[in-house]
Amino acid sequence: MTAAADTTLAARVRRLVRTMAPEPPADLADEHRLVEDLGFDSLRLMELTVVLERAFELPRQRPEDLVGVRRVGEVIALVAGGARGSGHG
């Protein structure tokens, strides 16, 4: 994946996260925490997972793969890794 493709992917992920966040900030940063800063609860996090899987044609994520994903930047890294692995992006 090229640097430009990585930048585009990151922008798309940020846009989806911001759209789905119960408490979206004016400027979304990679350091924002999904639960504490953006107001996600467990149900909303599962919905976000499904939306990202569909938007980026990712394989279904296992719960254990998502345990350490707490910040926007970590969501972007997870999606980027999945997009590379599936040949999409």
Image: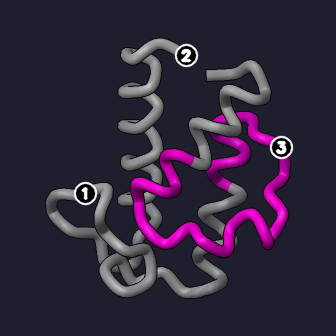
Determine the residue located farthest toward the left in the rendered image. 26
Name the residue carrying label 1: 29
Residue 55: in magenta span: yes
Amino acid at pointer 2? Met
- Residue at x-position 49% and y-position 57%: 74
Amino acid at pointer 3? Pro
Q: What span is colored magenta in the figure?
A: 51-77
Mark pair 3, 1: CA separation? 26 Å
Residue 6's place in the image compared with 52, above or below, is above
Which secondary structure lies at badge 2?
loop
Q: Position of residue 80 (x, y in %)?
A: 57, 36
Q: Position of residue 12 (x, y in %)?
A: 43, 38
Name the residue carrying label 2: 1
Residue 68's place in the image compared with 50, above or below, is below
Name the residue carrying label 3: 59
Mark pair 1, 2: CA separation? 22 Å
Mark 3 or mark 1: whose residue is earlier in sequence:
1
Amino acid at pointer 1? Ala
Residue 80 or residue 38, whichever sits in front: 80
Nearest to viewer (mark 1 / mark 2): 2
Residue 23 lies in quadrant: bottom left
Q: Position of residue 41 (x, y in %)?
A: 54, 87
Q: Which label number is shown at residue 61?
A: none
Judge the density around disc 2: few (<14), some (14-19), many (≥20) Cα neighbours within 10 Å.
Answer: few
Residue 23 or residue 8, whichever sits in front: 8
Q: Position of residue 19 (x, y in %)?
A: 40, 58
- Residue at x-position 48% and y-position 81%: 40
Which secondary structure lies at badge 3?
loop
